[in-house]
Every structure is written in C-alpha cells, then in structure tokens.
Amino acid sequence: MLELRPFNTLGGAHHGWLDAHHHFSFAEYHDPQRMHWGNLRVWNDDIIAPGTGFPQHPHRDMEIITYVREGAISHADNLGNTGRTEAGDVQVMSAGTGIAHSEYNLEATPTKIFQIWIIPNEGGLPPSWGAKPFPKEGRDGFVTLASGKAGDNESLRIRADARLVAATLKAGESAEYRLDSGRRAYLVPATGAIEINGLRAQARDGVAVEDEAVLRVTAIEDSEIVLVDLA
C-alpha cells in the first residue's frame, strides 16, 4: 500500500524567517489522520532565512534527525556541543532526559532542512548529539545515514527501531530498498520527481508505505530521495 501525500496538502505556516511545512500534526497544525506513521512522529520541511533560526529550546525523550538539503545549519546545546552541518550531511540529537539547543542559519542564503522526529525505544537515557558528512555524490543506491538497527556501523546511531537512508539518482536511474515483514516506510523526494512501485511523486511530496516488501524507485528527473524504515 502506497499513500501519496502531496506537498500542497501538508500543514504549516510562514513565519517570515521560517517557511514551515508539516507532514504530520505539529505546533498549530492538527490532523487526526496524520499524527504519526509507526514510530515516526514528525517530518518537517523547513526553509530558514539567512541570519535567523531557532533560539535555545528544550527537548526530551525524542530522537531528532536533521537532514540538510541546501545551505547549512549551526547547532549549539547546553552540553557544550557545537557544529555546522552542510547540505547532504546529517546531525542526530538523542534528547533523552533533556537537552536544550539552538539551530541557526548563519549563511548568506536560505537553508533548507528536513527535521525528522522518531519515538525512542526507551526513555530516560542520557542526552547526546552527533553529526557526520555524507556526500551526495556516489549515492547510486540507498545509503544508510542514521540507524538504531544492528549492523549499521557506519551510520550515526539513534535509539529507535528505525533507519534513515538516502539516494541521489540521475534521470532514468533506479534503486531498490527492501522492507522486512511488518515494517513501514515514509519517503520524500527532496528534489526532482520519482516513480515508486508505479506511483509518481514530486519533490517534497510524502509517500507513506505499508505492506510492501520491495520498493523500486526510479528517477523521472535528477532526484534526491530520503526514506525512513520504521517499526
């Protein structure tokens, strides 16, 4: 089963400095049919104006992944962690017992991110933060960026039964991703246009996946694809 969630049906708001679109209920956007997908709670599509960002604010017991699509995001938190994550790269924050952080676009151009929240396997663990570069070049198949699954040793670690993967495909190229029995997925083309198991999706559309063993993604245009494999 594939459910297309077109970009123009997403919730969201334009705050001047922040143009936010929500795949699931978040902040002032509430849709009882779009509360979560498995243990995926939030998928926000944010465009942050230059010189602006989110001032320090707290989180608790959530795995928060930031995938940078364009530009860069600068992070600082009350644990003393700081970092600048560029386009194609990923940062992960395990909020655990509590963490306060800020995220700013200190660049001269808008920064575009996906921020993805996943419910952890266990609450009350110590908070942590990490980042890692994942060049977009060479992703002719799906590359694991963050994972809580055994064996994904090259990726950033999260404390959730989930895996974040991405692929960068030229027009006409295809890639496959296999889902274990009982798993769900949520997929968004960051750019381009794709066909997934016969369903066409445009840039920034969401595709909710259930009861599909193999996902075959073909790029209709040059495309950057982000997918979360979920419990």
Image (cartoon, helix red, strand yellow):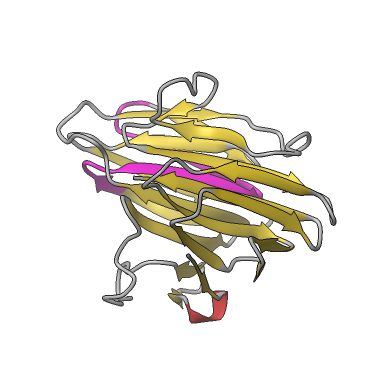
Q: Nearer the viewer, residue 12 or 103?
A: 12
Q: Is residue 35 above or below residue 225?
A: below
> In the image, residue 166 lies at what x, y percent?
61, 43
Start-end of magenta stretch: 57-80
> In the image, residue 58 lies at what x, y percent?
25, 46
Residue 49 lies in quadrant:
bottom right
Q: In this view, does 167 lie above or below 30?
A: above
Q: Nearer the viewer, residue 212 or 170?
A: 212
Q: Which of 78 and 212 is in front in this view?
A: 212
Q: Nearer the viewer, residue 140 or 116?
A: 140
Can residue 88 be seen here? The reply is: yes
Which residue is the extreme one toward the left? Answer: 124
> In the image, residue 94 lies at what x, y percent?
32, 34
**Image point (59%, 47%), residue name:** 68
**Image point (66%, 66%), residue name:** 198
Q: Is residue 161 above or below residue 32?
A: above
**Magenta span contains residue 149:** no
The number of discs equals 0
Can residue 108 be seen here? The reply is: no
Residue 82 lies in quadrant:
top left
**Magenta span contains residue 62:** yes
* 227 left or right, relative to 65: right
Q: In which quarter of the image is the C terminus?
A: top left
**Image point (81%, 62%), residue name:** 221
Q: Which secondary structure type mostly characterizes the magenta part of the structure?
A: strand
> In the image, residue 195 lies at what x, y percent?
69, 63
* 120 left or right, relative to 129: left
